[in-house]
Image (spheres, grey):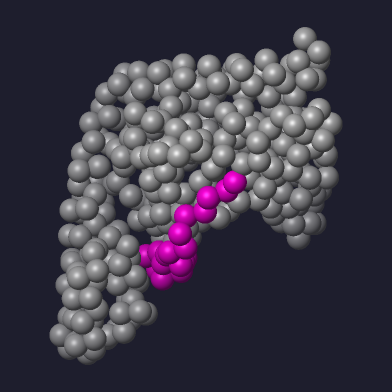
């Protein structure tokens, strides 16, 4: 255990798929094994897009149950709801005042909206609420509130961690050395993970494999993987096969080598290969799936964990706010 503080936020948007998991969640679960970790369900970050409280609440439970089931180390980790720590609203407001508007104009997700609107010939800010526009400031507040050193995130979030560093720098320049510089930790590059249709796995293509779905649903998904029309007898190139690419993410080296050989030798039909893939994923994920289902049936247990996490988080957050108030308001 070194003394670096790890922090990450999980946006509650429904069951993560394999790509999300490997890119962002697994690195934080791994770091939680030997670091003091703050991990929260970023329910406030969901609000710019989700305007249905029931959905936010349900997805928040799912996200928490998911992280627990996948093995986050709760002895080292304060797992909590972002919205339960009032200091987050305070720090966000304070940071607003040192953050240049131009920085927000450069945020990838805002720029993507502007580009889409421009192409459509409508007002550039159409459909952009202030939650979306100031999203990176809330995220900087998340990171800076808990004195984080390491911030495991998916590649798509790297810019936001860089913005947190920028904002910490603006603050420090004005008010003197206050915030540490957090560092993004990007999960090892597993390459592009193919989805069921062979394109990159992404919710927007509807080609994902949700990580902890029921067994029969998993089977149905895997049977939907698109293949070419080679006969069972023909040798096949494993490196061009979605089935094999996904298998590699779950199987050990010996198993991978064995399946590679069967692809190359011929005599393995795609139907059989899919069954092998299904059985592998199903067995690797069966224990976490059971734990996930058990937790989802016992929300009170999740609440207890989140409340305990929030208490720990609040202690650290309150100290940060005291410090910032002194620096900014003199009180
Ligand atoms: N924005 C992140 C995402 O969409 C979630 C998040 C919110 C986060 N606050 C954070 C991640 C702070 C890391 C640190 O996935």
Residue 185 located within the stretch drawn in magenta = yes
The x, y position of residue 172, in whole percent, is 77, 33
Q: Quadrant of the N terminus?
A: top left
Relative to 187, 30 lies left or right: left
Give the number of marks: 0
226 in relation to 139, above or below: below
Would you say 33 lies left or right of 50 here?
Answer: left
Q: Residue 141 vs residue 1: left or right?
A: right
The secondary structure that most of the magenta stretch takes on is loop
Q: Which residues are magenta?
A: 183-200
Q: Is residue 213 above or below residue 45?
A: below
29 vs 225: above or below: above
Q: Depth check: 215 or 63 in front?
A: 63
Q: Residue at x 24, y 78 (%)?
A: 260
Q: Is residue 141 magenta?
A: no
Q: Position of residue 210 (x, y in %)?
A: 35, 51
The quarter of the picture where residue 121 lies is: bottom right
Question: Between 211 and 164, which is closer to the camera in this rendering?
Answer: 164
Task: Write the residue at 53% across / 16% down.
Answer: 315
**Spot occupied by residue 81 in the image (x, y as percentages of width and height):** 48, 25
Q: Residue furthest top?
A: 331
Residue in the image at 77% along x and 9% along y: 331
The answer to whether residue 138 is visible is no
**Taking 204 as reference, is 195 above or below it?**
below
């Amino acid at each position: 255990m070194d003394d670096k503080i790890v922090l990450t936020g999980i946006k509650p948007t429904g069951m993560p798929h394999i790509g999300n998991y490997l890119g962002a969640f697994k690195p934080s679960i791994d770091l939680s094994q030997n670091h003091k970790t703050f991990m929260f369900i970023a329910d406030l970050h969901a609000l710019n897009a989700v305007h249905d409280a029931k959905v936010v609440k349900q997805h928040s439970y799912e996200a928490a149950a998911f992280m627990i089931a996948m093995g986050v180390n709760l002895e080292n980790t304060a797992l909590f709801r972002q919205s339960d720590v009032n200091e987050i609203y305070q720090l966000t407001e304070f940071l607003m005042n040192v953050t240049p508007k131009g920085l927000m104009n450069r945020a990838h997700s805002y720029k993507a909206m502007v580009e889409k609107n421009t192409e459509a010939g409508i007002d550039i800010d159409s459909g952009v609420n202030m939650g979306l526009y100031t999203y990176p400031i809330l995220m900087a507040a998340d990171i800076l509130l808990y004195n984080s050193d390491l911030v495991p995130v998916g590649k798509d979030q790297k810019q936001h961690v860089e913005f947190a560093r920028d904002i910490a720098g603006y603050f420090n320049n004005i008010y003197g050395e206050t915030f540490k510089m957090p560092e993004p930790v990007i999960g090892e590059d597993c390459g592009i993970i193919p989805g069921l249709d062979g394109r990159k796995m992404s919710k927007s293509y509807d080609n994902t494999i949700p990580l902890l779905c029921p067994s029969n649903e998993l089977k149905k998904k895997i049977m939907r993987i698109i293949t070419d029309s080679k006969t069972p007898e023909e040798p096949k190139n494993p490196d061009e096969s979605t089935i094999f690419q996904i298998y590699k993410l779950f199987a050990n080296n010996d198993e991978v080598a064995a399946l590679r050989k069967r692809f190359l030798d011929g005599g393995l039909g795609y139907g059989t290969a899919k069954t092998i893939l299904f059985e592998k994923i199903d067995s690797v994920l069966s224990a976490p799936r059971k734990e996930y289902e058990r937790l989802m049936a016992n929300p009170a247990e999740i609440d207890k964990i989140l409340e305990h996490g929030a208490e720990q988080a609040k202690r650290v957050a309150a100290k940060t706010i005291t410090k910032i108030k002194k620096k900014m308001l003199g009180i």
